[in-house]
Each structure stands twice: as structure tokens, then as C-alpha cells.
Image: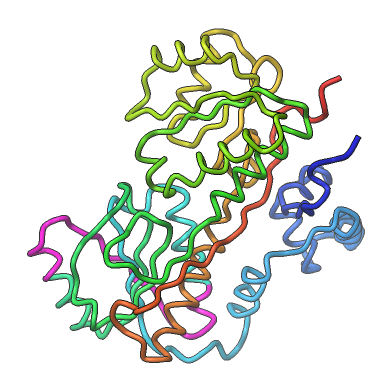
Amino acid sequence: MHDARSHVRQQPSMGDVARYAGVHQTTVSRALRNDPRLPAATCGRIQRIAEKMGYRPHPLVSALVALRRARHPPRYHATLGYLLRGGVDAPSRQEHLRGGRAAAAMQGYQITPFHLETDARSQQRLSRALRARGIHGLIIGSLPEAHGHFELDWDQFSTVVIEYTFTTPVFDRVVHDSYAGMRRIMAECRWRRVRRVGLTLSRTGHERTERLNIAAYWAEQKADGFFAAVPPLILPEWRAAVFQRWFERVRPEAVVTSNEFLPEIQAWCARRRLRPGADLQLVNVNTDADGPVSGIYQDPFAIGALAARLVIDRLLQNERGVPALPYTLLTRGRWVEGATLRTSPAT
């Protein structure tokens, strides 16, 4: 049988190597750099496993490690502002910031977070504070709402946006390719012969991705008749009774969702003694890199790193203000096999 996934190369993670070798990720990291604290035999065994699996370290992380060990790191140039609303408690925002700081450090820049308030007076104060500190490069982080907007003295800043959540004014942005991610999910379901695929998202999450998940979902359903015509469920907030009625009506074999509804659906399954991956297939459009839930890992570290590179480039070109022709850079995530989608085609 043709493998619908064969055109996409799977890149194993350090966690995959660690599980295969039966060691902790820290041990793998040390073995790959021949840490003298590990026995040579252990280093050799783990390196052979990594080579056999085709593992390649993240180039930016490797460069940052080398930078930290260098005797003469890059000379400090400037500080970039990282604008946030709602803090950095969400794991993806933490990784955006960590990736941004890693990329900035390689070019001699630092990143300082600033928390946004919603009122105009606070935004004016923030503009003055940024200028007073000599900060002219800004990264607008992912916002909790869809179609975010606030006002700063944009002509004073080189600005890059992460994701689609900040939409006015329109700046250059870096965002995960949600359309391609959903197509990959549907390809995985197709390969496993899962025909009845249901999609449920929060209305905010639906809007935060410019409706691209549902666009790809509809396109795959209508492509060649393989998938059943299952209507998606978009909710303003989690409503178990509504989900229950939808589930009973459409009878999906698999449910595709996001982090916002995932815990609720897992709890719903537990109450009904449904086993994800056995009784019901479950897929996350934004799963963890080495987590148990099958889906797409969007690699927020790489997204943050690319945003930092772009804003530094804009600074060096002295490009400030709102661009006349803004562009969007799409990043591809990777498939995480997990344990909630069956591992082989149905017989």
C-alpha cells in the first residue's frame, strides 16, 4: 500500500534518541559532544544510535552552545523589545522568547520583555520608555486574543510580529503554516485509513490562525471522496453537552483539536472509558515535541529565532515604521507520532 507520508521526511528529536537508547536526554546531549564525564563506550553507543536514526541537532541551538563556550562572544550592539500581553507562562510563548534570545545573542543583541496594557495612556508610556532605553527593534509576541491591535509610535521602531494575533497595523510576521499542518494531519489519517475525521476548535483559536485549519480541512474532505463529509464544530468556549451532541451525530473515528480543548476532550474520553488511539483517534494541531498526543509540533523556538533575525535585519537596514509591502514567513512544523492515533493502516 502506498504510504501517503513518504514525501515528508521525519526528523527524529533528541527525545526519540534518548528513548531508543534508554537514557535521559541530558545523557544524549553529553554523548553527542563527547563529554568526558561519560564513558567512551556510552558516548559511542549513543552516537551510533543517533546516526542510525538520522538525528541532526538543531543548528541554532548548537551554535548558541558554541557561542556560550567561546572566549570572545559577539560584541553587544543593542537591546530588542519583546512585547507581550498575558505574560510568558504559556509554553509556546516561553519557547518563542527563548528562540528569539538565542538568535539575538548570536548577533550581539539582547531581548527584554515588556508587558502590554490595553489602555491608550499605558501604550503611550511604553513608547516613551522604549525610546528612553534606546530600544528601536520590537518583536510583538503571540497575543491571547484574535485580531489584536494597539498603538505605539511605530515610525520609531523596526517591528516584526509572531503569529496572526496582532493584525493592525500590518507588519512583517513569522507564523507556523497552519494550512500545511492540517494537510499533514489529514495525510496521516488517510494513510491509517481513518475516513471520518472530525475537527473541533474554539472560536478564538479558529480566528487566531486566520481560519486556515478549517480551510485545509474542508479542502482535504472535498479532494477525492476519501474522507467523509464531517462538519467541524467551532465553539465560543468548551461546552460538553454541545460536543456530545455533535459527536453522536457525526460519529467521528478521529477528533482533531487544539490545546485549548484537548484537556476537556481527554476528560470526556476518560468519563466514557474511551481510550485515545484505540477507541477514538485523537490529534492535536499544536502538540508537544515529545508528548504522548499525536499531532503537529509547530517548533515555537524556531519561530522566535526567525523573528529575532528579521527584526535585526530591519534595524541594520534602517527600515522603521509600517512597511509598504509587508510579508509573511511560514514555518513548517513536524509530525509527532505520539500514542493517540493508530500506528498502521486499518485492516
Q: Is residue 32 above or below residue 314?
A: above
In the foreground, 199 or 115: 199
Residue 53 shown left or right of residue 240 in the figure: right
Q: Coloured how?
A: rainbow
Classify residue 54 by image quadrant. bottom right
Q: Is residue 316 above or below residue 41?
A: below
| Quadrant of the snapshot with the N terminus | top right
Classify residue 343 by image quadrant. top right
Say if the magenta span includes residue 29. Answer: no
Residue 296 shown left or right of residue 307 in the figure: right
Residue 106 place in picture, x, y as percent: 54, 81
Residue 112 place in picture, x, y as percent: 34, 71
In the foreground, 318 or 63: 318
Residue 208 place in picture, x, y as percent: 39, 47
| Quadrant of the snapshot with the C terminus | top right
Give me the residue at 62% from left, 35% from top.
222
Q: Is residue 270 above or below residue 3?
A: above
Give me the residue at 59% from left, 9% from top.
273
**Residue sitting at the far left:** 121
- Magenta-highlighted residues: 103-124
Residue 285 shown left or right of residue 145 in the figure: right
Count all numbered tags in the image, as a single digit: 0
Give me the residue at 72% from left, 54% from top.
14
Classify residue 320 by image quadrant. bottom left
